[in-house]
Amino acid sequence: MLSLVPLEPVDYLVIGHVARDLTPAGARLGGTAAFSALTARALGLRVGIVTSAGADVPLDALSGIPTVTIPSEHSTTFENIYSADGRKQFLHYHATPIDFVHVPEAWRRAGIIHLGPIANEVSPILPKGFSPDLLGLTAQGWMRGWDESKRVHPVQWEDQFALEAAGAVVISLEDVGGDMEQVERIAQHTRILAVTEGAAGCVLHWHGDRRRIHAPKFTEIDATGAGDIFAAAFFIRLYTTRDPWEAARFATLLASHSVTRVGLDGIPTEQEIQSCLVEVLS
């Protein structure tokens, strides 16, 4: 619900829809806002969420995290169908778009503001009055389109102004449909760009340099949310160390652990966090 009382400042603000993910085991909470917020809290930050959702998705997993929820008839609802031909993703419902007017004044100066759309629900440009130390974008929600059958497909998104305004951007190779030329164009307008490639790790673009960070091998149970965990860990470690290479290393390690568990159970544990802070990738 919309907050009626002033909220305390936060260190990490994520703005975007939570998702109702339909799975063979039933519906469950997902979306960048959920995975990234829980990861940020696990990393010790004060976290806030601005989202939009209906009564069809329980937010119990976010208990303890201050959340401004814009009412909606339905939550943004995704379904993934797997076959021999690969994955087909469908967007069944789309929640109410998010307007920055709903962001509490005290949160507009958060150290990190993370714009994490999943279905083009929020503008990539912060309005006047917002002044984070680090603006992080996960662009997947602006790189998704859907047809009349509600099937999701990649779309071109290269908002030069938004890319240049961001402190760091995270996308996946899937977001661009494997189009490396689009990745290169995005990198040209971005201070720091991390491109996740699933089990292969990520490729970091910074100052005209490009470096691959390989992921350790774990038995994958569920990769849902791994990219969102990567993004939160990357933005936070970048903010803390000002070292993009170290941020990419840490985020790759932490996200790799997450695939060994299902859904939100993949949120990093304290033991995993401490291990990834000191482990060195070969």
Image (cartoon, rainbow, N blue to C red):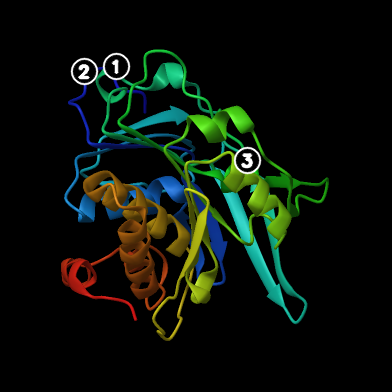
Please give the residue where the numbered disc 1 appears in the rendered image. Answer: 105
The x, y position of residue 238, in whole percent, is 31, 49
From the viewer's perspective, is residue 212 above or below residue 241? below
On residue 142, the disc is: 3
On residue 175, the disc is: none
For marks 1 and 2 on the same chain, the one whose residue lies earlier in the sequence? 2
In the picture provided, is 182 more to the left or to the right than 49? right
Q: Secondary structure at mark 2?
A: loop
Q: Secondary structure at mark 3?
A: helix
- Looking at the figure, which quarter contains the N terminus? top left
| Circle count | 3
Task: Give neighbour class at mark 3: few <14, some 14-19, many 20+ (Cα, 10 Å).
Answer: many
Please say if the residues under marks 1 and 2 sit with CB atoms less than 8 Å apart.
Answer: yes
Alpha carbons under labels 3 and 1: distance apart: 25 Å
- Looking at the figure, which quarter contains the C terminus? bottom left
For marks 3 and 1 on the same chain, the one whose residue lies earlier in the sequence? 1
Three-letter code for the amino acid on which mark 1 is drawn: Glu
The x, y position of residue 38, in whole percent, is 29, 52
Please say if the residues under marks 2 and 3 sit with CB atoms less than 8 Å apart.
Answer: no
Nearer to us in this view, 53 or 6: 6
